[in-house]
Image: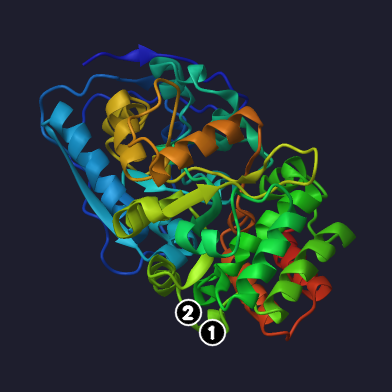
Amino acid sequence: MTEHLVTPHSAGTVGTKLRVLGLGACALFALAACAPPGSGSQPAASETAPTEVSTELGDEPVELTLYDGAGLKAKDEALIEAFTQKHPNVTITGRYDPDDVQAQNAPRVLASDDPPDIARVIALSDVAGDGLLTNLDAYADAYGWDELPEGQLAQYRVDENGVRGEGPQYTMADGFTVTGFYYNKELAEKVGMTEPPQTVEELEGLLAEAKDAGIVPIMAGNQTGQVMTTTQMLLNNALGAGSINEWVFHAPEATVDTPGAAEAVATVQDWAEAGYFPADTNGTDATGALGRFAQGEALLYASGNWDAAALDEQMGDDVGFFLPPAPEGNEPATMSDPASNFAIPAGSDAKDAAAAFLDFLRSEEARQVVADAGFAPSGEGEVPTTEEGSVKAQIQEAFARLVEADGQVQFVQNATNGLTTTWNSEVQRLVDGSTTPEDLLGAVQTKYEDELGR
């Protein structure tokens, strides 16, 4: 087994040396509810920042557990199959929580006595500061992860003050989401849409045309928070990608409670009152909304590339995709963050093998798997193969344009572990008229500051 003695290059806390000499089987994932953070034994500092690591897996059997959201199971299973074909002595077992609770459950899972070896982390700064994740700087040096695009690396780092974008590396993504509007080409032709709208004003005109034609303008399952997608698209335009990212990354004094944000949220409420979302949106979930759009009930569907494979299969050439329109003269900006931002829990006893899986995520094999699932691949390299003219090809082209414009924006629901519930419930109330834009933003900012202890 090859060992590398490296010194972490970031300014994180470095404890005593940890020598990883073997790759014994990891403990089985706890099936019962995990203990809350702090209830189990916390890892020593040396366990969270190893300085001697191996990039060799050897021949002995290794068992790993991977934890993610259920909606990403197919992608994960394909990645696991590709990795274990290259490393047949490694077995990876997946464990999945429902997507709408995975972020909230993650801290308990990471703090359990038998944590997984690879785990998707959404609110990174929340758990990195609790010593629940392995500082990956030693592996970054061993594998050369500093060659990755800086815009991607920023999403993997968090400093000692809990501010993301700088500091030690704690995660590695398998790929990236990109959000925008899917559109039904047949219905687009009926309402005179010859090309995607270039401004919000053009988009509003299109929504009005669809409504007048008896077509649902924007399909959304707001029982599971899908109107939030449209809401943040407008917030991105109002506040700018930089301001939104600073808020999600916990920059000091960052806020979304501004007059510009209130104006953007008011537009969403106006659209709801005008009937631009389904009348039963608050009683429809994401699965139902996807099916109804695929069956031709709506002109647009505001969502991300996680739905690309299903829509490609169900609609074929009749579905297209475009990025949200930006203010006139501005480059596009939309939500695009890691599909699965994988960390190695500090309590894993098979860190070297887990790190090998993280490194595999930037390989050409993994990049193709991720593209086949409809996501944009991690790392750099040749654009994965997609069928020319397909919605998957349109998404890859849109992602390339977004990266070139430096327009990747973090999802505001992911700023802390508890904010998804707050955002979604407040936007449900916005749609049914039981709150105001100002009260919504005030509630969100209060929850944000409470969770950060500010």
Marking on residue 250: none
Residue 123 position in % (x across, y down): 55, 51
| In contact (CB < 8 Å): disc 2 and disc 1 | yes
> What is the three-letter code of the residue carrying label 1?
Asp
The number of numbered discs placed on residues in the rendered structure image is: 2
Q: Residue at x 39, y 16 (%)?
A: 142
Q: Residue at x 40, y 26 (%)?
A: 383
Q: Which of 453 and 340 is in front in this view?
A: 340
Quadrant of the snapshot with the N terminus: top left
Q: Can residue 419 be seen by looking at this rendering?
A: no
Q: Nearer the viewer, residue 146 or 383?
A: 383
From the image, tell me which residue sits under label 2.
284
Distance of mark 2 from mark 1, alpha carbons? 6 Å
Q: Is residue 79 left or right of residue 220?
A: left
245 versus 280 height, above or below: above
**Element assignment for label 2:** loop
From the image, tell me which residue sits under label 1.
280
415 versus 50 height, above or below: below
Q: Which residue is drawn at 63% across and 62% down?
A: 230
Colour scheme in the image? rainbow
**Element assignment for label 1:** loop
Q: Residue at x 65, y 76 (%)?
A: 212
446 versus 352 height, above or below: below
Q: Nearer the viewer, residue 45 or 439?
A: 439
